[in-house]
Image (cartoon, rainbow, N blue to C red):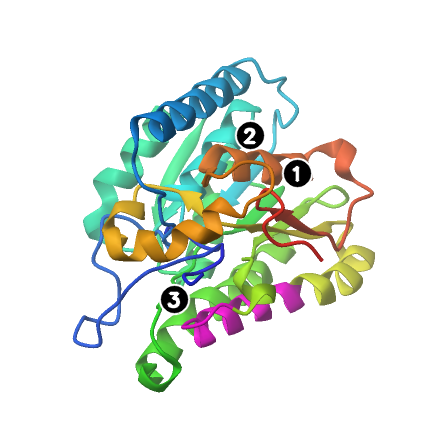
Amino acid sequence: MIGVFPSHTSTTTEHPILLQAASEPPRPTDSSNQIHRHIQQPMTMESLKDSNLVAERDLKAQQSSSKTLQGKVAIVSGSSSGIGKAIATELSYRGASVVLNYPFSRLKDEGETVASNLPGQAIAVCADMGSTTGPAALVEAAIATYGRIDIVVNNAALAVNKPFEEQTLEDWDLLVNINARGTFLLTQAVLPHLTSPGGRIVNICSASSRAAPPMQTIYAGTKGMVDSFTRVWAKELPPKYGCTVNSVSPGPTRTEGFAAAGEDVMKILQPTIDAIPVAARMAESSEIAYAVAFLCEERARWINGLHMHANGGLFVD
């Protein structure tokens, strides 16, 4: 997502606008591992109606989806809410067994509720992607339960929006450890177990990595790292592991966390929303999830190294 400026929350990406005061603790205390906070356009009855129609249409499509991922096992990091939850839901409807992830024990009920509500098999695993041991623990849980891994979606991330002069080493360590190192370590831990041929690695990037949003020096930098990881891995890993490596880059996306940004931030973001060519609205998380699921399909076997913009044309390169 593009951060604010003008947050996968959960958001990610994509205009993530997670406002974190310097006095706040280094880790988020909200109810999810959402990481990019996306901001919502002014909540008018018309915009709410349009959003609900999109969500309802996507739900019907999910429920009638062909089981194109039947028998597959997918890890989705940062998936107890927001975009990650939507990705897990989409993959589950397509037949995959899903390994959900939440970062802290206090979110156990939330993670297990999401898992129990999915249409297929799923487990929820507590593992902090910002730690050095969390990524490997998530992989170990997946193997212990299902004995295989076919898909890994690196979604967990966090955004901090501050003027450059106010960003701190604490902010740096927090975002780099979760957004970049977490993606690095989870992928590294998955590789020995990734189905070959046919494995899928999908990284959730952000329009911020290429759109240069103000107040997002560290966040945009970490997403730029993930962008570069994708390109390097797409060259290096397929010959050795028979996989594909791609990324999906959301723009502003409606998630549970958008309201936390407040009206002032929404006003800042509104001109950006209005400039989206396809429609002057935020994306629904289900629309991002569809893009991810497409890349996980068997028929997407020849797509490798793609940076897929899922932002309605807000950013094009």
Q: How far is disc 3 from disc 1 in space, using C-alphas?
A: 25 Å
Identity of the amino acid at label 1?
Cys
Q: Residue at x 31, y 83 (%)?
A: 166
- Disc assigned to residue 96: 2
Element on which disc 3 rests? loop
- Disc assigned to residue 130: 3
Q: Is residue 18 magenta?
A: no
Element on which disc 2 rests? loop
Residue 241's place in the image compared with 22, above or below, is above
Residue 254 placement: quadrant: top left
Q: Is residue 214 magenta?
A: yes
Q: First in sequence: mark 1 or mark 2?
A: 2
Residues at circles 1 and 2 in contact by the CB criterion of under 8 Å: yes
Q: How far is disc 1 from disc 2 in space, using C-alphas?
A: 10 Å
x%, y% of residue 148? Answer: 58, 41
Q: First in sequence: mark 3 or mark 2?
A: 2
Identity of the amino acid at label 2?
Ala
Q: How many residues crowd around disc 2 within 10 Å: few (fewer than 14), some, or many (20 or more)?
A: many
Identity of the amino acid at label 3?
Gly
Say whether residue 76 is visible: no
Q: How far is disc 3 from disc 2 in space, using C-alphas?
A: 26 Å
What quarter of the picture does the C terminus occupy?
bottom right
Q: Tell which tag, 1 or 2, sits nearer the viewer.
A: 1
x%, y% of residue 289? Answer: 53, 37
Give the extent of the magenta segment.
213-229
x%, y% of residue 248? Answer: 61, 49
Q: Which residue is mark 1?
A: 296
Q: Residue at x 64, y 57 (%)?
A: 191
| Of residues 128 and 52, the one drawn nearer to the viewer in this rendering | 52
Residue 40's place in the image compared with 49, above or below, is below
Q: Residue at x 29, y 49 (%)?
A: 32
